[in-house]
Amino acid sequence: MKIPALFAAELRRLTSTRMRVIALIALILVPVLYGGLYLWANQDPYGNLSQVPVALVVSDEGATLNGSARNLGDEVADSLLEDGSFDWHEVDAAGARRGLDDGAFDFAVTLPADFTAAVASISSADPRQAEIDLTTNDANNYLASTIGTQAVERIRTTVSEKVVREAGLTMLDALNTVRVKLLDAADGAGTLTDGLTTAGDGADTLADGAGTLAAGTTKLEGGATKLASGVDTLADGLRSLSSGAAQVSGGTAELRSVADRVGSAADRVSSAVPTLRSDLTSALTDQGLDDAQIAKVLDVLDPIGTRVDDLDTRVQQAVSQIDALDDGASQVAAGSSTLAKGAATAATGAHTLADGIATADAGAHELDTGAHSLATGIHRLEDGAGTLRDALQAGAEKLPDDSAETRAAQAATLADPVGVAEDSLTQAQNYGAGLAPFFAALAGWIGIYALFLIVKPVSRRAVTALRSPVRVAIAGWLTPAALGAVQMVTLFGVLSIALGFSFTHPLPTLGILLLASATFAAIILALNVWLGSVGQFLGLVLMVLQLVTAGGTFPWQTLPAPLAALHHVLPMGYVVDAMRQVMYGGVAGRAWADAAVLATWLVGALLLAVAGVTRMTFRRTMRDLQPSLIG
């Protein structure tokens, strides 16, 4: 009997009755039910998070942020409700707690009363972090708690970006204002520099003038001293003059008095001459002199009268001159007295003037020193103003001259400075497609394991009759391998058609599934040939080991060291890796290497099965004579 005949005989046995057909179909569908239903349920859970009920508690009382009244809690709540990433329910704290207790909410997010105030404290002397309270209940769902942690982290990132963006925009606007003010200050410093230059020139001129003034006041001080000395001498002379003038005035007054008396006498003599002449004429007439005689006598007398008149005239002129001299002497005495007094006053003034000029000279020298110091200071100030102007201009040039749109873009970048550029060499279609390699491999093992519940590993009659271990072992493998192929083709159809998973390389993917199923069939066959029911049980143990070591969910590097070592030995990890390469469009070389490992397991398991059948052909064991406790 050849291998096809043995294969056909086993199929006839499996389909000999209706119940066996039903059982066979049910077992063939085991991988489809396991892998298909699980992947259908987990096809895109992250795309359905909007159905996850979450409590949102907003207790924020608001605060002043960036100069305006804000309530970030309400703003965040509005954003979350509008976003709809979860099934948000805005409730109070008590309602959130009740919902977590009775399972109405998977987790709760609370924005506390000081949420905005804490954010605003960044610009205060007592900055503190704002807190978002996450309350979970693992009794409802552990993964929901993990998802809640990720959700709160996204909320925190969003709020941080919002706050940093607004604060950054405020800062950039302030820097722009500072730049404008610096430029204005630089212009003002330039104007100041120009003014100080002019002031410096004026100060230099003032210093030169102050020097000239100081030199002049020094000379003037010498002249004033000499003047004061001369005025003193003049005052002394005028005092002597006044004294002599007073004496002269006294003498002229006496002379005037005498002259007045002489004048009066002369007047009387002159006045008496006509009377004397008349009296003489009368006397002569009385004496009996005739007119001629009298005339002779009068002729002698008249010249005397004329001389008396002349003398009187001269006397009166002299008296007038003496009076004038006395008046002049009085005036000279009065004037010299006034002049002496004036000279004394002038001497006092001259000394005062000399003292004032001396003070002025000292002040002029101080002014000279101060003017030169002022000029020096103004020039230093001019240099400082120039330095200030240059520094202000340089500082303004270092500040960016950006438009409002650019500042807004910069603030947005400042809020989120690092982006993630995703460049996937390969990419799964969705979460379900990401798990498909693992669960397809696991479904293949479960399917083969289930088939061996009704498929005979080897026909003992054929072992006895044919005595051909190779043909018996190959025939024993071919039946579950063929049925496993049907399982894999059906599973592939469900994944590609029913679930809509895309395959970069569909035929190689199907080929890996068929190779994996054939390899699993060979391994479980060898276990059954050598150990019987115990081998079947070890197949279950191997499934559990491969479930945790294949690296189908978390990276295998996260496994404990013993399990990580098994990852490199057991075949399912290679099935998962090969599936990922061909399904997502990975490295073909890795897929071929994985296939080679599976082929090695296949050949090795078949050789081990052949060895087991050979032993059964020529030897009998206690297991052959006594059934196993587990079947």
Image (cartoon, rainbow, N blue to C red):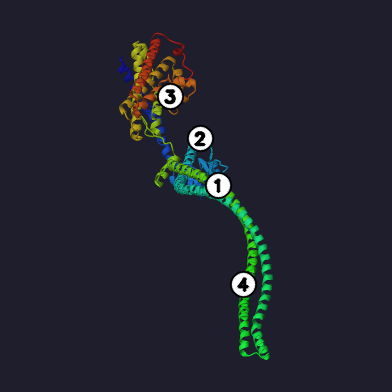
- Binning the other alpha carbons within 10 Å of mark 3 as few (below 14), some (14 to 19) or many (20 upward) gives many
Tell me the amino acid under the disc marked 4: Gln
The disc label shown at residue 370, or none: 1
Residue placed at 69% from the left, 70% from the top? 254
In the displayed structure, would residue 616 be above or below residue 515?
above
Secondary element under disc 1, as helix, strand or loop, is: helix
In the displayed structure, would residue 458 be above or below residue 138?
above
Give the image location of residue 500, x and y in percent: 34, 35
Question: How far separated are the C-alphas under marks 2 and 3?
Answer: 23 Å
The disc label shown at residue 518, or none: none
Residue of label 3: 550
In the displayed structure, would residue 188 be above or below residue 347?
above
Lower position in the chain sequence, tag 1 or tag 3: 1
Give the image location of residue 22, x and y in percent: 37, 29
Query: Which numbered disc, 4 or 1, marks the residue closer to the eye?
Result: 4
Residue of label 2: 142
Q: Nearer the viewer, residue 417 or 579?
A: 417
Lower position in the chain sequence, tag 2 or tag 3: 2
Tell me the amino acid under the disc marked 2: Tyr
Query: Which numbered disc, 3 or 4, marks the residue closer to the eye?
Result: 4
Q: Are marks 4 and 1 in contact (CB under 8 Å)?
A: no
